[in-house]
């Protein structure tokens, strides 16, 4: 049971890494700091809903460190960690209330992620200029979070049966 | 249409109405939060247009702790160097537009951000800690305070 879970966590991590890599290849709103599709967030949702908070955070931190070392730098790691921290906190709280649909939780997570990143970038530069992009970032977080949420919902209901039985 | 068909239609509509009401009732939390979020996004767009909607006249280049201003009306090539005078980025101001022409940062995202021409827009080079912004002189006091 334990080793089965471990191998599935490894599988999720690999999938998340591949999605993160694919994301760096997609020319989507270049350069506005924080604007991403959040494909890897689909794996975060799966982990959160199938295995729970602890495993979800652990896998996500490992993912961010690996992506940071391969495709980024010290700052991009901090940047990703802050975004991930914001989104995970919001999603865990919303999930705990048990009142919200998975897709809605994902939408809030996406928006929180982008807000966290624009805030850390504003602190880093010490200017309010970047807040110009906050509305666009909130909107993209809403849309991308929604799409990822709907996909994740379909995956969770199917995988949960597969992973928790036997 | 006879009376009977009409009654069936009314009954069907009532069923749909009840089902619709039930769906809304079951999803009240979800619907509420979605409405709040959409309202929030619209509010932020309105606030942005309220603060930043003039024609810009100044290019502010912030590099580490140094802040320099250039007039947007004059065409200019600005080389950005580090303290050892090694050349890293080239910002171009031309015809009221600003862009990053060259950069030796690893991600080159600053070059991909394209040309900016509206007040409030920025080009960011995270690895070199450079931010190039367009603004209107004397427009918002808190931004002038930051620029000093
Ligand atoms: Zn750059």
Image (tube, coloured by chain):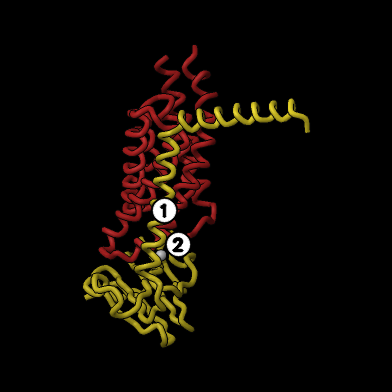
Chain colours: A red, B yellow
Res B68 quadrant in image: bottom left
Q: Mark 2: is the Cβ under 8 angstroms from ligand 1? A: yes
Q: Secondary structure at mark 1?
A: helix
Please say if A106 is above or below B38.
above
Give the tally of numbered discs: 2
Residue B20: percent from left, percent from top: 55, 32
SS at mark 2 in the image:
helix
Residue found 30% across the figure and 71% down from its top: B62
**For the view shown, which residue lies furthest in the front direction?**
B3
| Residue at the disc numbered 2 | B109
Left or right: A25, with B135 as reference point: right
Q: Residue at x 36, y 78 (%)?
A: B59
**Looking at the image, in which quadrant does ligand 1 appear?**
bottom left
Residue at point 50%, 28% (across, down):
B22
Which residue is located at x 50 percent, y 58 percent? A29
| Chain at numbered mark 2 | B
Q: Does B114 sit above or below residue B55?
A: above
Relative image position of residue B117 (x, y in whole percent):
45, 75
Front residue (pair B6, A91):
B6
The label number, if any, that marks residue A34 in the structure image:
none
Circle 1 residue: B41
Q: Tag 1 or tag 2, which sits nearer the N-term?
A: 1
């Amino acid at each position: 049971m334990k080793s089965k879970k471990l191998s599935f966590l490894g599988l999720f991590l690999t999938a998340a890494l591949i999605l993160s890599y694919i994301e760096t290849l997609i020319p989507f709103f270049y350069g506005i700091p924080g604007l991403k599709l959040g494909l890897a967030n689909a794996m975060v949702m799966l982990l959160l809903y199938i295995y729970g908070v602890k495993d979800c955070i652990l896998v996500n931190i490992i993912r961010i460190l690996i992506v940071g070392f391969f495709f980024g730098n010290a700052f991009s790691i901090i940047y990703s960690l802050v975004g991930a921290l914001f989104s995970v906190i919001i999603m865990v709280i919303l999930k705990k209330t048990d009142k919200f649909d998975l897709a809605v939780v994902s939408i809030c997570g996406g928006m929180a992620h982008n807000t966290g990143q624009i805030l850390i970038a504003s602190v880093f530069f010490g200017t309010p200029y970047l807040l110009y992009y906050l509305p666009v970032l909130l909107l993209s977080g809403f849309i991308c979070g929604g799409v990822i949420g709907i996909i994740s919902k379909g995956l969770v209901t199917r995988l949960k049966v597969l992973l928790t039985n036997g | 249409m006879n009376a009977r068909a009409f009654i069936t239609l009314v009954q069907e509509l009532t069923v749909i109405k009840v089902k619709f009401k039930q769906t809304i009732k079951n999803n009240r939390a979800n619907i509420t939060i979605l409405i709040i979020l959409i309202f929030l996004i619209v509010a932020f767009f309105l606030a942005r247009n309220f603060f930043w909607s003039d024609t810009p006249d100044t290019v502010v280049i912030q590099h580490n702790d140094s802040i320099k201003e250039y007039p947007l009306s004059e065409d200019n090539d600005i080389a950005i160097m580090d303290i050892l005078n090694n050349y890293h980025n080239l910002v171009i101001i031309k015809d009221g537009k600003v862009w990053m022409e060259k950069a030796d940062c690893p991600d080159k995202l600053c070059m991909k951000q394209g040309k900016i021409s509206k007040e409030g827009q920025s080009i960011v080079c995270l690895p070199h800690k450079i931010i190039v912004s367009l603004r209107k002189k004397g427009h918002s006091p808190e931004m002038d305070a930051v620029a000093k």
